[in-house]
């Protein structure tokens, strides 16, 4: 197996120099109480907002997918020579640090439908800001840093059982990809051999095939802004 790792770094979580670092403090607070003498925490950055607990309609379940991905990273790390045990992984959803009007609209909808695990305290300034309706002549309201950090950070415990479950789930995804790849090799019609998911807006926006996708009849989802 070969690939590219974005960032590899090592810090001491209990270092006095990091006492004022809120991200480090948030990770430490979320770790299990019983810790081995030496361990590792894997950090993965996502250039997106925090996904909902449950997908809308037929959209992909990114909440579970990214957890499986992190567990898989932990497994790959643990089989390397002289590796320390991985006890947790941390996902950082960078878009939560500076949410757009669209992000606030999604958060408002997910809060109403109870599809998110991090919500603003009722009556707080953050709750009021989230309820603000978009105005073309104004920038999005600024949420408190404490709330944005809670939205941006998700710490996931790692254990042998969680790694095994993630590996099985990831294997199923890989199987679907390999089957589609095999069908493509024997067919001149690539679009008919790969499953599409036009309900996932972010995927449609980024997809190179969106202009000729038969599932959309050459169009992106109706609720995707034209400027996207």
Image (cartoon, rainbow, N blue to C red):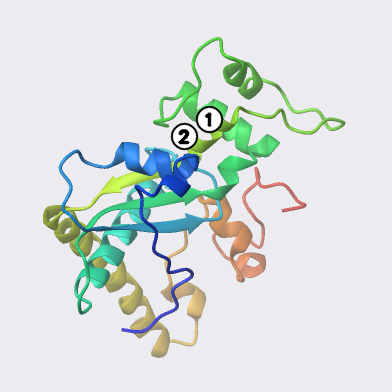
Q: Does residue 141 lie above or below 5 as drawn? A: above
Seen at 59% across and 46% down, the residue is: 95
93 over 191 or under it: above or below: above
Q: Nearer the viewer, residue 150 or 214?
A: 150
Res 60 visible: no
Task: In the displayed orientation, state which residue is furthest to the right.
Answer: 137
Tell me if mark 1 has few (under 14), some (14-19) or many (20+) residues whose alpha carbon lies within 10 angstroms of its own. Answer: few
From the top left corner, tell me how far across and down residue 66 is, in percent.
Answer: 37, 55
Q: Is 110 or 47 nearer to us in this picture?
A: 47
In the image, which disc is placed on residue 146? Answer: 1
Residue 98: image location, x then y, percent: 65, 41
Asked which quadrant contains residue 155, the reply is: top left
| Left or right: 185 as drawn, with respect to 39 | right
Which element is circle 2 on? Answer: helix
Is 213 on the left or on the right of 122, as rendered?
Answer: right
Q: Secondary structure at mark 1?
A: helix
Residue in view at x 49 percent, y 79 percent: 190
Q: Residue furthest top?
A: 123
Q: Position of residue 77 (x, y in %)?
A: 26, 70
> Which residue carries the number 2 mark?
150
Q: Quadrant of the N terminus?
A: bottom left
Dot 2 and dot 1 residues touching (CB under 8 Å) = yes
Give neighbour class at mark 2: few <14, some 14-19, many 20+ (Cα, 10 Å). some
Residue 212 in the image: state x and y as whole percent. Answer: 64, 69
């Amino acid at each position: 197996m070969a690939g590219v790792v974005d960032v590899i770094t090592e810090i001491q979580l209990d270092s006095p120099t990091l006492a004022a670092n809120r991200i480090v403090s948030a990770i430490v607070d979320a770790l299990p109480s019983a810790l081995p003498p030496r361990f590792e925490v894997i950090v993965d950055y996502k250039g997106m907002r925090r996904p909902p607990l449950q997908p809308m309609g037929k959209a992909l379940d990114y909440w579970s997918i990214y957890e499986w991905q992190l567990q898989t990273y932990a497994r790959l790390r643990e089989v390397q020579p002289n590796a320390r045990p991985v006890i947790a992984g941390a996902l950082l959803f960078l878009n939560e640090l500076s949410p757009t009007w669209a992000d606030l609209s999604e958060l408002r909808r997910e809060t109403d439908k109870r599809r998110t695990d991090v919500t603003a305290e009722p009556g707080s300034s953050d709750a009021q800001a989230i309820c603000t309706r978009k105005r073309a002549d104004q920038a999005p309201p600024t949420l408190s840093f404490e709330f944005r950090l809670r939205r941006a950070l998700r710490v996931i415990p790692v254990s042998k059982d969680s790694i095994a479950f993630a590996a099985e789930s990831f294997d199923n995804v890989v199987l679907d990809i390999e089957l589609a790849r095999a069908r493509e090799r024997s067919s001149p019609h690539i679009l008919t051999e790969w499953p599409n998911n036009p309900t996932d807006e972010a995927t449609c926006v980024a997809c190179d095939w969106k202009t000729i996708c038969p599932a959309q009849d050459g169009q992106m989802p109706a609720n995707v802004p034209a400027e996207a």
